[in-house]
Image (cartoon, coloured by chain):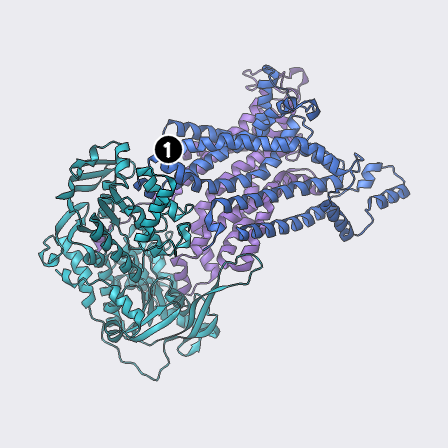
Chain colours: A blue, B purple, C cyan
Amino acid sequence: MIRAVALGLVSLVVTLIVASVLVFAAMQVLPGDPAQVMLGVNAQPDTLAALRAELGLDQPAVARYLAWISGFLAGDLGMSHTYGVPVAELVGERLAVSLPLAVLALALSAAVGLPLGMWAAARRGGFVDRAVLFFTQLGIAVPNFWLAMLLVLVFAVTWRWLPPGGFPGWEAGAGAGVRALVLPAVALAVPQGAILAQVMRQSLIDTLHQDFVRTARAKGLTRGEALRRHALRNAIIPVLSVMGLQFPFLLAGTIIVENVFFLPGLGRLILQAVNQRDLIVVQGVVMLLVASVAAVNFAVNIAYALVDPRLRRPA
Amino acid sequence: MNARLAAGAAIVGGVCALALLALLWTPHDPLALNVAGRFAPPSPAHWLGTDQLGRDVLSLIMRGAAGPVGVSLAAVCIGLAVGGTLGVLAAGRGGIGAHAALRASDFLFAFPALLVAILLRETLGPGVLNAMVAIGIFNVPVFTRVAYGASLPVWRSGYVAAARVAGRGGAWIGVMHVLPNIANTLIVQATIQLSLGVLAEASLSYIGLGVQPPQPSWGRMLYEAQTLLAIAPLLAIAPGLAIVVTVLGFNLLGEGLRQALDPRRATPPEPDAETAP
Amino acid sequence: MTLLAVDNLDVDIDGRPILRDVGLRLARGETLGIIGQSGSGKSMTALALMGLLPEGARVSGRIALDGEDLLRLDEAAMCSVRGARIGIVFQEPLSALNPLMTIGDQVAEGIRQHRRPARAQADALARAALARVGLDPAQVSPGRFPHELSGGQRQRVAIAMAVAMEPDVIIADEPTTALDVTTQARILDLLRGIVRDGGPGLLLVSHDLGVIAAMADRIAVMDAGRIVETGPAAGFGPRVRHPRARTLLAAATLRAEALPAPVTARSEHEPPLLAAHAVSRRFALPRAHPFARRTYRHALDDVSLQLHEGESVALIGESGSGKSTLARLLLGLDRPDGGRVTYRGADVASLPTDTRRRMRADVQAVFQDPYTSLDPHKRAGWIVAEPLHLDPDAGGSAREDRVAEALREVGLSPDDAKKYPHAFSGGQRQRIALARALVTRPRLVVLDEAVSSLDVSVQAQILDLLARLRAGHGLAYLFITHDLQVARAVAERVAVMRDGRIVEEGPAAQVLHAPRHPYTQALLAARPDVSAFAV
């Protein structure tokens, strides 16, 4: 266990360091001068220079990187050029929308996808299996933003059950907030859930063919008991790694789906910030996204070790 | 040939044929505006009706097929060329270098493709090229992993050991033994990445990062249809269905190929008894 | 009285006939050995008795346990028979155990399933069962996971699971095939003891006549889904009438008497063709955490071995002894960490290109698994011709002639050159691998477990072919094997390896008949005697 955690931590730290350098370097390559964008094309050269000095843009790159990263570690992501507020505050506001959305979507996809996959594997070749295969094929092929539009068309425009977009803010009450997130979460969850169901089904079918399942049956366990007590835990291991890989997809997906539903989340923030050359915001948000992906990978590795004694206690 | 392979091949073949045909001929000029005839319902003249500017939707969809198909194809080529080579080499050489290559390619996974595309637009300017590169970059770690995993047992196999004993070098073994034996796996993965590429291209062009106007693209058609959802739902449904059908086609093709190329389905060998003198 | 009576058992899977008219009798305290080659239906018989045939199987006939026909029981009733009244031990000790569950829990699970005792009581019974198979809970904790045990210990766990419920019948399906000889002997002792004290009937399924000979009271021979011969073990060989059964027994017993080809004359002054001088090779073990010190497993430790022109040497060792690592070093597939490998006296690490090519042509190899040693995407002719670039005389049209010649030499037809490997059987594939090794007209062929995955009768044919080729060309062989019978049949000189060292080396007659080192003695003692089964 110590070994798994230690290896995971080392790789997490290395990933974060390399990623921060890459993100910072990418920002330097971006054409366009933030000071110029803020002041407009008619700005006087001396005001421009003054603003650049104020923003710290006249410092060498290494110094700016160190300043940025040490601030980042202290929770200070700098000041947004365009919004005039601390980036941390801005991100915090947006995260209050994006994070519940991602969690809701992940929970929905797992809650529906995993049982469907298990059910199909247990009834392999039967009607349930074929139905699950058909619908997961379809679910994987549907772009989430199109699904989002169809959901709006049906549930918001035609039936008027749920709001078509926008976010009332959590001040308006948890119920109103969750209502605004239901459709986007479903749109994000359907393709991911379909993938999870397929991976779960295949992994469980493969595991059911393993010798130790036959051994369990030879001890007198019924088919269902052997599946529940022996196959399932073994089958979940590849599913975990797929869930880890899905997380970046989910984040990318939120950027677009937030646009469809006019949600004030991180995705919209990053699109606006790029357009306005608000580099300090872009840098902060991208770094945050990459860090969350790395953290999820770390968590997945720990989960592996918890499930699998071969990683916990190598012989 | 199994049913999935047949269905997948038919759909993919159909979409590609339409995309090629649309370069030469479409029912109407997809770029011709006709404001008087906008929002026309489906009719014999306009099978799928017209859009908010009076353009023929069917012609737009036909012309729009080139973007997703072309971009995802190019992205798969990038992934195969870089990731495939990296994976095969890493498996063959082993050691620190292989470890570093795998870690580096895994590292790319941490960057959502969309962010890469957004940043690329800022450096390269808008256009098809950055969509290809952004999706291609994302394909690299996938093919590295797949090529590594598939070629590792080949590099460790008895026939590679025999080729070394036969005095053959790494390049000969890589080309003559490893590539033919992992080709099936790579082909299957390529079709899966093609379907993901179509989806990704649609997302990118939805936020304006792919094919640029006035050239039609499925993603942007959806973007434009979004505000008109209440008055013209067909404008949102038709391009979406085009995406679903194309992605489904590539997925079916991939699964069909996986089944057809599965080495476990090879003909069983003769029993040994027949070799008895 | 008869404990288990099987009559007219027929099994079809997806319409293909698998078993035909199988009949067996097993009494309490008796061991029935079922022997047959792979694919003869012996494992399917075991699965049919357990009611665990794969999907799509159709069964008819009668399987009576204490007079009750198991084929008439519904699934729920069959679940209460499995484990409680019939226990089974499968071949692969690693894959047969759940990697995520402790061994104690896996043994206790069957007890809980049938007797529904309190948890503590089930655990106590499981500990007792583990102790009975030689896994004292004080030494091998029941809280261990399968990957923390050795192969023999894992098989003991599998046996504990099978015997924990005191079943009437124990089926052991190739229980020792995946194990080394010394471990095999201990596992067989354990099974013998269980049959003696508990009085269950043991149905022992094996392809290995040695195992059957060591254990069985009665023997049944299976071939093509039928039992072709059955009778008491005492005096079984001479009574056998069925031709396929006779071939099988003849191949398994006669091989020990085959004599090595005459020694070719050689000069003592010439340097050895190929030699290892005090080589060592170590592999890094995974570290406990990233800052821990690296630890190593020493696969080879100061090993020297000389191979002379025309000589046939056997390198004997169990799995993990380092014998394959030594072979890889000698073949130049890997480099030693210490010491050196020489070809005709010159260090192979610094051979000039032309000498290196000559060494490649002179030293060829055949590897163990005939299913992975031929590239499935290449035709047999291409495979055989692959080393020919080493031979300047084999360009152009000579190429095809050389391939045809090599194929004929190993007993195949030149027309076979056009076929792909999947069209050949295991034995034929090994002939193709041998043709590839012979095509450069080498002086030495390294045979790394080259016959160990083949059925006995095919093994005998390949060994026979090797002896003829040696007599014809004066070839030198290095046999790397875990099988003493193979070593006895082919080698003039024998080296025994254990834990990365050569513990004994000398003329075959001396090492194999009057061994000095205790490990060699143990190896020899562990090998069951099959001479009583000669037909």
Is residue A86 placed above or below C129 in the rendered structure?
above
Going by the picture, which residue comes out furthest to the bottom? C269
- Give left or right: position of A275 versus C523: right
Residue at disc 1, secondary structure: loop
Residue with the mark numbered 1 = A124
x, y (%) of residue A266? 68, 34
- Give left or right: position of A172 versus C307: right
Which residue type carries mark 1?
A: Arg
Chain of the residue that carries numbered disc 1 in the rendered image:
A
Is residue C481 placed above or below A195 in the rendered structure?
below
x, y (%) of residue A42? 87, 37
Q: Quadrant of the N terminus of chain C?
A: top left
Q: Examine the rendering and report whether any part of residue B18 can be seen.
A: no
Give the quadrant of residue B41. top right
x, y (%) of residue C298? 44, 67
Mark 1, residues whose alpha carbon is within 10 Å: few (<14), some, or many (≥20)?
some
Q: Examine the rendering and report whether any part of residue C366 can be seen.
A: yes
Give the quadrant of residue B123. top right
Task: Decide which of C531, C314 is in the foreground and name it.
Answer: C531
Residue at x 47% of width, y 46% of height: A308
Task: Decide which of C341, C278 is in the foreground and name it.
Answer: C278
Q: Quadrant of the C terminus of chain C?
A: bottom left
Residue at x 33% of width, y 46% of height: C125
Count of numbered tags: 1
